[in-house]
Image: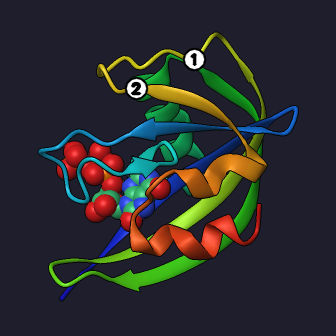
């Protein structure tokens, strides 16, 4: 099974993390996620994050640092999540694709259901 490289943004401001709900028709649909998406060929992780943050949230990240890389095999798909921490951005986040957004206090993240691969990220935030 080929591995899909995914840029994932942990957007953290004043102790809260911005999470979004995946649409039902998507892979791992109905679960909550950190914004992001597939990294295109010849695209850096940072540029993929900038593109996805604009496409999905209408914001422009201005401070990005690498956090971790997680490899996970779902039954139907293998992913490599390249996770970055974003601590500053320009603009006001909105769910441009109609996805619900929540600014979740770190201590409440465990009240939301995330894809299995995200468990390792939750332990690092
Ligand atoms: N964005 C995002 N994707 C995640 C997370 N955790 C996780 O396992 N994934 C997986 O990473 C893969 C790529 O994400 P995506 O579906 O958002 O990417 P995309 O928008 O570019 O793809 P699409 O156009 O096919 O919908 C999916 O298989 C998704 O299930 C997460 O926290 N955020």
Residue at left offset 17%, top offset 43%: 24
Q: Residues within 10 Å of mark 1 (few under 14, many from 20)?
A: some
Quarter of the figure with the C terminus:
bottom right
Q: Is residue 39 visible?
A: no
Q: Name the residue under label 1.
A: 93
Q: Which of 49 and 96 is in front in this view?
A: 96
Residue at left offset 51%, top offset 67%: 118
State whether residue 46 is above or below residue 116: above
Image-quadrant location for residue 47: top right
Residue at left offset 18%, top offset 49%: 26
Q: In which quarter of the image is ligand 1?
A: bottom left
Task: Compute the Cα span from label 1 to label 2.
Answer: 11 Å
Specify whether 56 is left or right of 10: left
Q: Is mark 2 on a helix, strand or loop?
A: loop
Q: Nearer the viewer, residue 101 or 94?
A: 101
State whether residue 74 is above or below residue 51: below
Q: Mark 2 points at which residue?
A: 100
Image-quadrant location for residue 92: top right
Residue at left offset 37%, top offset 17%: 96
């Amino acid at each position: 099974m080929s591995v899909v490289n995914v840029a994932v943004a942990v957007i953290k401001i004043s102790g809260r993390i911005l999470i979004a709900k995946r649409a039902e028709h998507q892979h791992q649909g109905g679960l909550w996620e950190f914004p992001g998406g597939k990294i295109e060929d010849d695209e850096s992780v940072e540029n993929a994050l900038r593109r996805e943050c604009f496409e999905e949230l209408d914001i422009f990240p201005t401070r990005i640092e690498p956090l971790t890389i997680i490899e996970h095999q779902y039954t139907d798909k293998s992913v490599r999540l390249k996770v970055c921490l974003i601590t500053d951005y320009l603009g006001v986040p909105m769910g441009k694709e109609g996805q619900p957004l929540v600014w979740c206090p770190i201590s409440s993240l465990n009240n939301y259901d995330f894809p299995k691969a995200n468990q390792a990220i939750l332990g690092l935030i």
